[in-house]
Image: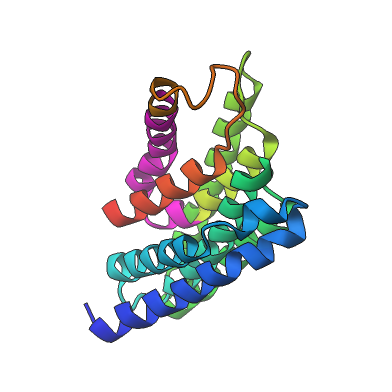
Amino acid sequence: MSVGLLTAAALCGGLVGTAAPTVARRFTTDRFATARWTVGWALVGAVVFAGLAAALGPDPALPAYLLVAACGVVLAVVDLACLRLPDALVGAAALGGGAGLGAAALAAGTPGRLAVALAGAALSFALYVLLALLPGARLGFGDVKLAAALGLPLGWLGWPTLGYGLLLPHLLNGVLVLALLAARRVRRDTALPFGPALLAGAWLAVLLA
C-alpha cells in the first residue's frame, strides 16, 4: 500500500470532515449542533478516507467510494443534529457512487460487476422497506433510501460484503443503545438516529472485504 495514497486520502478526508458541519447547516436550523466537534469530524473524515484507501488501494473504484464517504460524513452530522437524512445528500451519494462505479466498470472492462452492484442496491432497498414496515420499527424512509445508496458500493465488492453491510449497522446500533440505556442517557422510547450506524457498518464491511 502506497504511503502517498494513504496520506492523500487522509488529508482529503480531514478537509471533508472540517467542511461537513458547514455544509450540514444547509439542511438543518440547529446551527449549534452542527458547529460542535469540528475537529472530531475532521478526524472522522481522515480515518474514513484512509481506511477506504487502505482497503481498496489504487482501484479505479476508489474515487466512487470516497465520494460516497464524503456525502456520508455530512449525512452523519445532519442526522445526529436533527434526525434527518436529506434526499439531496442521499441522492448525491447514490448518483455519484453509481457514476463512479460505472466509470470503474468501463475502465476495467467488467460491466457485470456493475450489474451485481445494482442488484445489491435493489436488495438493500427491499430488505429495509420490509424492516421499516414492521410493527414498532423505528426506521424512517430516509434510512431505507440510504441503505439502497450504500448497497451499490457494497454490492460491487460481492455478496459477502453486502451481507456484512446489512448486518453490522444493527449490531453497532444495538450495542450503542444498550450502552446509552445502561448509562441512563436515553429511555426506551427515545428517538435515535440510525444513519450513522448504517454508514459505519458499510465502512467496516468494506474494510472486511
Q: Is residue 88 above or below residue 66?
A: above
Question: Could one spot residue 25 in this view of the protein?
Answer: yes
Residue 69 lies in the magenta stretch: no
Residue occupying the point 38% across, 39% down: 163
Query: 84 or 110: nearer the eye?
Result: 84
Residue occupying the point 61% across, 30% down: 139
Q: Which quadrant of the structure image shows residue 92? A: bottom right
Residue occupying the point 30% across, 56% down: 207
Provide residue 119's location: percent of width, then percent of height.
52, 47
Query: 187 or 6: nearer the eye?
Result: 187
Q: Is residue 92 above or below residue 13?
A: above
Residue occupying the point 54% across, 66% down: 70
Q: What residue span does the magenta drawing correspond to?
A: 153-178
Q: Which quadrant of the figure contains the C terminus?
A: bottom left
Majority secondary structure of magenta residues:
helix
Provide residue 72's location: percent of width, then percent of height.
55, 57
Q: Which quadrant of the structure image shows residue 45? A: bottom left
Question: Could one spot residue 99 in this view of the protein?
Answer: no
- Looking at the image, residue 12 sits to the left or right of residue 204; the answer is right
Point out the residue furthest to the left here.
1
Provide residue 201's location: percent of width, then percent of height.
41, 45
Q: Which quadrant of the figure contains the N terminus?
A: bottom left
Residue 165 lies in the magenta stretch: yes
Q: Is residue 48 above or below residue 119?
A: below
